[in-house]
Amino acid sequence: RGVTGLKTCLFTEASSRAVSYAVNALLKQQYLKSMQWRSGISITYDQVNFDFVIPSADGTKTAREVLGKERAATMKEILDTYKAHRSGSLWTKAHALVARLANLARSPFDITLFLDTDTALCPSATLPQMLKILGRNATLRLAELPASKGKPSAFLINTQSELRHMKCMSQRCAHCTTFRGWNTQTDLLCIECSLQCEETRGIMANNCSSFSEQPPPLQVGSMIITRSPELSQLVDTWIQAYFNVFAVNKSNLSNPLYDVYGNDQVPLNRIVASMCSERYHVATSFTVKQLSPGFNFRAFAFDSNFVVAGRVTVLHSHGIHNYENKAHGGLVSVVKRICNELNPAHGLGLRHIRHGQYNDPEHISLTTKYIHMPS
């Protein structure tokens, strides 16, 4: 909230009182004081606390409603015997992600930027206006995985997608495709122009009909959702698809040990594939559209490459927690420095950003080269 001016909401199983206690305890910790000193940012209770603290949906209750009590109990019994990738059992993961899906439809805001816990925001005075623009004409917006992965094979796909997108923009608003034309002053105008060309971005736009065999890889760590009856339909469809994919029973047990078991991205991929493919077409009133890579920038992905146009707004990385408890730097200090490098005021045009190999928060190395579109 401190860098965007937006209102915030937390879905949690903890009480509002417990959250307030935790926030006060956080402000008293020595490492946070160190972060404030290093970053030059004064952090207050109002900035750290949430405007809304809402009890999370009950994933177990939802499972019973969708599967019935007996099938849900059997699924829980089986998945409790398998350990999840990070912590807890596979059932802990499954019922938590089902709760997260249900929470999408329970946001108190008309337009919501829904973020994973391993994200951080770059300062942006225009983010409220950006969300209003991006919330139009779409129930859900999210980036495709290649645009936020940074690995060699994904980088090629990401580059081709953004070049195709910028070529379209050059025909509508050429100033946004020049080195200095897209800057902090023209950011909102260029986003408006970008949306005129949104059908050219990503695999989803380029070859939609192939998804009956290979669903598009979508990334749900950063999503923009618009409150509407269509959102409720999307959430219901997503939850149903989740159990269609992952429900298990004793007589037909598919091995739930593979890497993406229980991930909510998998059923969403299949929903979008069904929406795209004529052969598997489903009647829906909701719309799923692209989100710029700048809203899901894979920060701290060492030895990686990205192509992005416009402001980098959301940093997303499993490694982001590594900086939270380091008093010598701290998350606030590291994020401030990276955001300043990623978003130079003089030029937010199409650029190739390479992340160095160092894994030390004091020596993060970013290299930016601008890509000039042919006239």
Image (cartoon, rainbow, N blue to C red):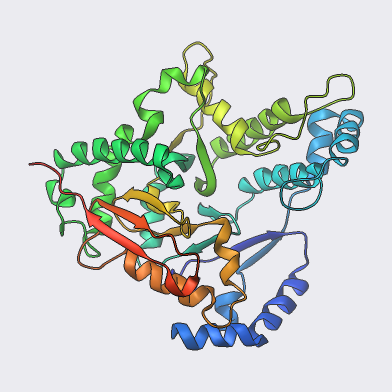
Check the image and report above or below for 366 versus 77: below
In the displayed structure image, the side of residue 89 where residue 158 appears, left or right: left
For the residue pair 183 and 160, the one nearer the viewer reads as: 160
Residue 249 visible in this rendered orientation of the protein: yes
Q: On the rendered structure, is 113 left or right of 78?
A: left
Residue depicted at 29% across the width and 36% down the height: 160
* Residue 158 in the image, given as x and y percentages of width and height: 35, 40
81, 348: nearer the viewer: 81
The residue at 78%/28% (across/down) is 255
Residue that sits furthest to the front in the current view: 357
Q: Quadrant of residue 348?
A: bottom left
Determine if residue 227 is in view.
no
Residue 115 sits above or below residue 253 on the image = below
| Residue reaching furthest to the left | 375
Q: In percent of the image, x 10 and y 41: which residue is there? A: 374
Q: Quadrant of the C terminus?
A: top left
Image mark count:
0
In the displayed structure image, the side of residue 56 where residue 172 appears, left or right? left
Residue at horizontal 18 percent and vertical 51 percent from the top: 176
In percent of width and height, residue 5 lies at 45, 70
The location of residue 81, given as percent across then percent down, is 88, 40
**Image location of residue 39, percent across then percent down:** 45, 82
